[in-house]
Image: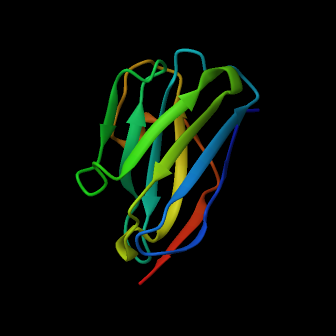
Amino acid sequence: QVQLVESGGGLVQAGGSLRLSCEASGRSFSGAAMGWFRQPPEKEREFVAASNWGGGTTFYADSVKGRFTISRDNAKNTAYLQMNSLKPEDTAVYYCAARTGALVYTIQGQYEYWGQGTQVTVSS
C-alpha cells in the first residue's frame, strides 16, 4: 500500500512562510517524480510545483515562481514545498503527488499516488 502523508499546513499572515512536507511510505520512490498541487476554495485543483528524482529538473506555476521552492530528501522518501511571501490567494488545500515514471509533468492525470491534503490559510 502506497501512502503519501502531507504535513506542515496551517494559518499564517500574508508575507509569512510555511514549509510543507510529504512523506512517502510503502515503497521506494527512487527515480520517481513528485509534485505539489492545490485546490483553492470553490476552484479546481491546480498545479503548483514538480521535481524529478534528483531535483535537477523543476517546474513551477507562474503564480508561485520566485516564492515557492520544491525540494526532496530521497533518503527519507520525503518532498518539501517551501512557501515564502505568502498571499491570501495562496489559500488552498495542498496535495502532494507521486508518479513511478522519471519524467516530470504538470498534469494531474500523470500522477498515480496522492496524499490526503493539508490546509494552508493565509490571512490578509
Q: Is residue 9 visible?
A: yes
Q: Residue furthest left?
A: 62
Q: Residue furthest bottom?
A: 124
- Displayed quadrant of residue 105: top left
Q: Would you place residue 35 above or below residue 18 in this image? A: above
User: Which colour assignment does the render follow?
Assistant: rainbow
Q: Residue at x 45, y 58 (%)?
A: 38
Instruction: Report the number of discs.
Output: 0
Near-viewer residue (72 or 117): 72
Q: Would you place residue 21 above or below residue 93 in this image? A: above
Q: Residue at x 55, y 41 (%)?
A: 80
Q: Residue at x 55, y 30 (%)?
A: 72
Q: Percent x, y for residue 63?
A: 26, 57
- Displayed quadrant of residue 14: bottom left
Q: Would you place residue 62 above or below residue 13 in this image? A: above
Near-viewer residue (11 or 95): 11
Q: Percent x, y for residue 50?
A: 40, 37
Q: Would you place residue 53 above or below residue 93 in this image? A: above
Q: Is residue 108 visible?
A: no
Q: Residue at x 56, y 52 (%)?
A: 19
Q: Percent x, y for residue 47?
A: 36, 50
Near-viewer residue (29 or 74): 74
The N terminus - image quarter: top right
The C terminus - image quarter: bottom left
